[in-house]
Image (cartoon, grey):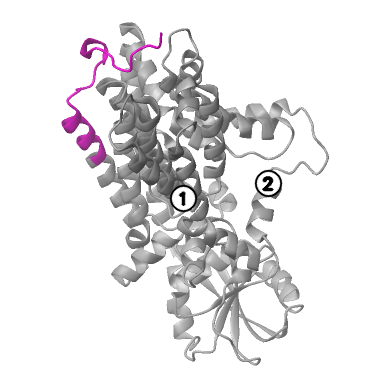
Amino acid sequence: MDETTTISPAQTGTIRDDPPFAIWTLIGIFLAIHLVSAALMPLNIDESYAVTVSRVPSLAFFDHPLLAFSPARWSAELFGSEARIVVRLPYVLLGAASTWLVWSVTRRFSPGAALWAALWFSVAPYFCLAANQFVGPDGPLNFFLLLTLWLVFPAVFDDGPGRPMLRWTLGGAALGLAMLSKYHAVLFAGAALVAMLALPKGRRALRTPGPWLAAAIAAAMQAPTILWNSEHHWASFVFQGARAETHGHMSFDILGLGTLQLGQMGFFWPVPWLIAILAIFAAFRPGASQERRAFALIAAMLIGFFDVVALIGNRSLPHWTMPGFLVALPIIGLWCVEAGERIRRLLRPVFWLGFGGSVLILALATWHMRWGLPFTDRPAIAKREFAWDTSDWDDLLRQMRERGAFESGDEFAYGLRYAPAGKIGYALGPDIPVLSSPVDPRHFAFMRNKPLPADAVGYAFEPARLATVAARTGQVRAYLAGRFDSVEPLDPVIQKRGGKDSFAILVFRVTGRR
């Protein structure tokens, strides 16, 4: 017989269990923290790139489906601004909503389990420092995956749930939106199907029209992604698929697998990571509920897929496994309330260490990216640091305007790769078209900018360390000479951080684009 999905109040643990107070306090604290950081922290290279390429409407992007970058663009259009807080606001709000969904999904087991799950979600470095704040696909993906679970699990595991077809219909739409956020959702859908086939209640649900209706809805919603790719030689699918390609040289890479585990511990904190592994195994003990096993199966497959990718010798990044840990959160919370009182006493300081650690890292990162930490002025550190990818380029437009650049509507900006092109585009604003060289242009290669005259004047930019301006100028000039008929080096823009010179932005006036 399956275990029940409720835990007595005496077992729920420690932190105040009154759900409205606890969860709304938790959400309020982290919402305030993320709003402050989102307003102050400069956009990183991926965010700058996302904001820049989303200016031109597209059914999908080279890197990700439609909803990865579009919320930032919709917010910018709504508020008439591309300020940091504006473009990040949808992702911050989705992070807050995801916290509530983690709590709500886990509350099917017990209030205490729900609170523990939400606590670990909030302080996990990856969710706290990146997914719940940065412009990118992970915030929308997490929200819509959790929404799918919240809608569908009652239809599968509850006896006589209210309006099951409505749940399946909305769940299919939520899954479709997750798949429009990041391709990881396809793996989630496959893992969920395997979990349903493995469990009696899942097989019973598959004999009804609900799951198939949900699958049809989710699949139909992928029309924008399919259409864009069909018109662009399946570029996005080829790019993402190549990340798991071994090029015929499979190996047994224990070091790569171990490195991935260390990365997972860093992104989720070591103790919650260990609890996640224990909770997955605990879900298969005799008497465990089918719902608990479903969470464990899906989580294990999402994590295990990328573990296998790392083991066979290809690159696998820790954040790719985070959707698996997201799905594991309900059984992590359940494991915490089932643990003995001695273990729960140990978990309390571990949580506060995680809370303090994540908030401190976020605060230090925000301060350093915006103003620079004092110890970074030491010569040994300053010599090695190259802050162009995490700093604002807010001196660029002002200094170029002072030089009389970008006064006509036919001038353009040019970056040597997608990353600096994104920083250039965000710094110059939406009125100046930005092009990227053919070397790793990402979505810049597919943007439909307004046509430029053949004799249009442009300005190419490239970041450089202050100590290497002369040498780097010669290198970049030689490269640009193969792309333009005329290349004229100009004085570099010196970007400041915290009132001090930080790095140089090399400037070249170019004409005759080939």
Q: How many neighbours does mark 1 have within 10 angstroms: few (below 14), some (14-19), or many (20 or more)? A: many
Quadrant in the picture for residue 448? bottom right
| Left or right side of 485 for 293 | left
The residue at 64%/38% (across/down) is 316
The residue at 62%/62% (across/down) is 229
| Left or right side of 439 for 433 | left
Is residue 65 inside the magenta stretch? no
Please say if 78 is above or below 431: above
Q: Which residue is mark 2?
A: 243
Residue 470: x percent and y percent? 67, 70
Q: Earlier in the sequence, mark 1 or mark 2?
A: 1
Residue 362: x percent and y percent? 38, 43
Q: Secondary structure at mark 1?
A: helix
Q: CA distance from mark 1 to mark 2?
A: 28 Å
| Left or right side of 322 for 84 | left
For badge 2, the amino acid type reads: Arg
For badge 1, the amino acid type reads: Ile
Residue 92: x percent and y percent? 34, 50
The residue at 64%/26% (across/down) is 258
Q: How many neighbours does mark 2 have within 10 angstroms: few (below 14), some (14-19), or many (20 or more)? A: few
Is residue 19 inside the magenta stretch? yes
Q: Which residue is mark 1?
A: 217
Single out the residue that lies furthest toward the right.
248
Magenta residues span 1-27
Tell which of 451 and 298 is nearer to you: 298
